[in-house]
Amino acid sequence: MSVRENIIEFNHRLKNCNCRLIAVSKTKPVDLILEAYEAGQLDFGENKVQELREKPDQLPQDIRWHMIGHLQTNKVKYIAPFIYLIHAVDSLKLLKEINKQALKNNRTINCLLQVHIAEEAHKFGFEENELYNLLNSNELKSMENIKIIGLMGMATYTNDRDQIRSEFQFLKKTFDSIKKKINLPNVAMNEISMGMSDDYPIALEEGSTMIRVGSKIFGPRIYRK
Ligand SMILES: *Cc1c(COP(=O)(O)O)cnc(C)c1O
């Protein structure tokens, strides 16, 4: 199927649920992104700052660019003027820098906190106790140019569907508990970013509001990642 057909199919499938498609266009050329845009897709995800510095100028200005990958503090400044949502915030230091650069650009930047839900040790993200330490910290209270609008997670790369499901359930449970317990002006739990090409059907069943799908839309990438 073409990119255009894939976009139409995905958005048709999502029509009656509270979930948006983030089309992950990393490594893909702008003509394919344009094809998706012309099929009605507005949300695109990239995981490298370099690609986010090159692509937007060549594409329609109403595209909403999502940074879905690990973000280095020293690169926040390049995306701060335009980024729509940063999915993988995984430290207080990074959050502080995002707040600083957002202030410089006279805007508020929406963020998701990445939670470590996978069993692999190398995947980024906060552990549950670290998450609460951050959410209860005084430093967070003074950050007026960020808004934490939800959580993001990546399940273990495995064929064990039950394991993937229980990792997504853990993320949803954490989301619900933060929503209940944390009351701050710059925190509003609305979004759960979970699910990729191989596991998005499970993520949808477990309450995802943003699935990040790359290869099922644009075809396989030459480099995994
Ligand atoms: C690459 C990537 C995706 C999309 O992966 P696919 O398996 O191609 O759908 C989703 N989320 C993150 C964080 C990624 O880096």
Image: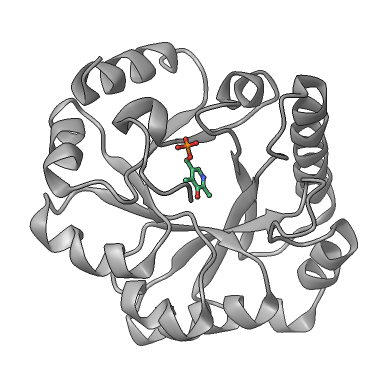
Residue 200 located left or right of residue 131? left
Quarter of the figure with the N terminus: top left
Using the image, determine if residue 51 lies above or below residue 170.
Answer: below
Task: Identify which residue, 95 or 44, lies in the foreground.
Answer: 44
Query: Which residue is pictured at 29% across the width and 63% down the height?
Result: 52
Query: Which residue is pictured at 31% across the width and 51% down the height?
Result: 27
Task: Identify which residue, 141 or 91, lies in the foreground.
Answer: 91
Using the image, determine if residue 210 lies above or below residue 113.
Answer: above
In the current view of this chain or complex, which residue is farthest to the front? 222
Residue 83 located left or right of residue 150? left
- Residue 224: give x, y in percent of width and height: 47, 47
Count the marks: how many? 0
Task: Identify which residue, 59 or 180, lies in the foreground.
Answer: 59
In the current view of this chain or complex, which residue is farthest to the right? 129
- Residue 109: give x, y in percent of width and height: 44, 67
- Residue 187: give x, y in percent of width and height: 65, 60
